[in-house]
Amino acid sequence: MTEVPKQDFDTLFAAVDKIMVDITGKRALVTGASSGIGKATACALAAAGCNLILVARRLDRLEEIKSAINARGLKVSVELVAGDVTQNDTFTALDSCGAFDVDFLINNAGLAKGKDQIGQASIGDWQLMIDANCTAAFRMANCVVPKMVARGGGHIISTGSIAGLESYEGGSVYCASKHALHAFMKVLRYETYSKGIRSTVVAPGFVGEGTEFSEVRFKGDKGAAASVYKDMDELRATDVAAQIVWALRQPANVCLDLIHIMPSCQGSATRIHRGGKRSDSSL
Ligand code: NAP
């Protein structure tokens, strides 16, 4: 009988500081990189030494990120693909620059559109959410998985949501789309865990600072968007990006299947304590 290896004290005391794997030189495809969680993730990955392919519709925003990376002298390559992830030509453009041959896919592009109840909601808004949050994200995975299998490894992270775990009034199709994404990711995990591929759902609660999420949901109504976060110490885009990088930097034997990250002041999709910002980190 083989013995289970014992760990020495140096390993135990260094568990958090030294466990993080170096991801320098890895290649990552980040969708929805022009704003919010995707933008913060792109910058965090560049700081960690990853070469990037960034996708979103707004090229000027992507160029700003590339300039900021270059201005910091980070020794990483940055390729930009301006396109709508719901459109075939974006997939053709990505394929032609070899963008599906990556170590990491950060499947993040997505949106909530409208907060109307089912009888009043716009079918067009529903279609947009299903196309971007589901079909495009599923299709990205479909494109990268065969290449990851061929190279014997890879990591796919999708930005899910608390709306993929709970449902709330006014969120019918957004919740449905994120539930579908979570279900898809579970199947992806079942189909690929034996092939060296890791997959993770990062499911945040309210993320405000750094994102345009609520402005998009309320169709440019800045007042309505700001009121979502009123007197609340919500998550920042950087908080979520840090979780994504944390998941990517786990040792080969560890897969974080689901990271459900919530603001401290949010107990569920609808339980929110609006007690202002907390400046200290003590409990
Ligand atoms: P955001 O600031 O609005 O960013 C959304 C990103 O997705 C943008 O870069 C946008 O780029 C891109 N995008 C949207 N539709 C696209 C399309 N059809 N084609 C290409 N790119 C598209 O919002 P965020 O909060 O960072 O959202 C990122 C992800 O987190 C989404 O999947 C969202 O559902 C999820 N999430 C957000 C929250 C939150 O409270 N903020 C909570 C849970 C989950 P362009 O407009 O330039 O194309």
Image: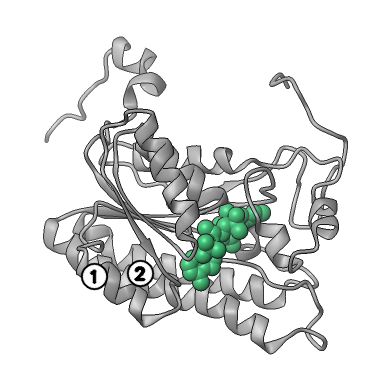
**Which is more toward the observer, 210 or 104?**
210
Residue 249 is situated, as x and y percent measured from the top left of the image, at 34, 37
Secondary element under disc 2, as helix, strand or loop, is helix
Mark 1 residue crowding within 10 angstroms, few (<14) / some (14–19) / many (20+) = some
Q: Is residue 248 visible?
A: yes
Task: Tell me the quarter of the picture where residue 17 sits.
Answer: top left
Q: Seen from this angle, which residue lies furthest top?
A: 10
**Relative to residue 149, is residue 120 depicted above or below?**
below
Give the residue displayed 58% in from the left and 74% down from the top. Answer: 177
Residue 239 is situated, as x and y percent measured from the top left of the image, at 57, 38
**Relative to residue 209, is residue 178 depicted above or below?**
below
Give the mark, 2 or 1, whose residue is nearer the N terminus. 1
Q: Are marks 2 and 1 in contact (CB under 8 Å)?
A: no
Tell me the amino acid under the disc marked 1. Answer: Asp
Q: CA distance from mark 2 to mark 1?
A: 11 Å
- Which label number is shown at residue 29? none
Residue 55 is situated, as x and y percent measured from the top left of the image, at 40, 60
- Which label number is shown at residue 95? 1
Disc nearest the viewer among 2 and 1:
1
**Which is more toward the observer, 258 or 36?**
36
Secondary element under disc 1, as helix, strand or loop, is helix
Which residue is the site of mark 2?
A: 140
Give the residue displayed 73% in from the left and 22% down from the top. Answer: 283
Task: Tell me the quarter of the picture where residue 85 sits.
Answer: bottom left
* Number of numbered labels in the structure image: 2
Q: Is residue 161 visible?
A: no
Q: Is residue 104 left or right of residue 59?
A: left
**Relative to residue 37, is residue 233 depicted above or below?**
above
Ligand 1 location (quadrant): bottom right
Q: Is residue 12 left or right of residue 216?
A: left
Residue 11 is situated, as x and y percent measured from the top left of the image, at 30, 16
What is the image's colouring?
one colour
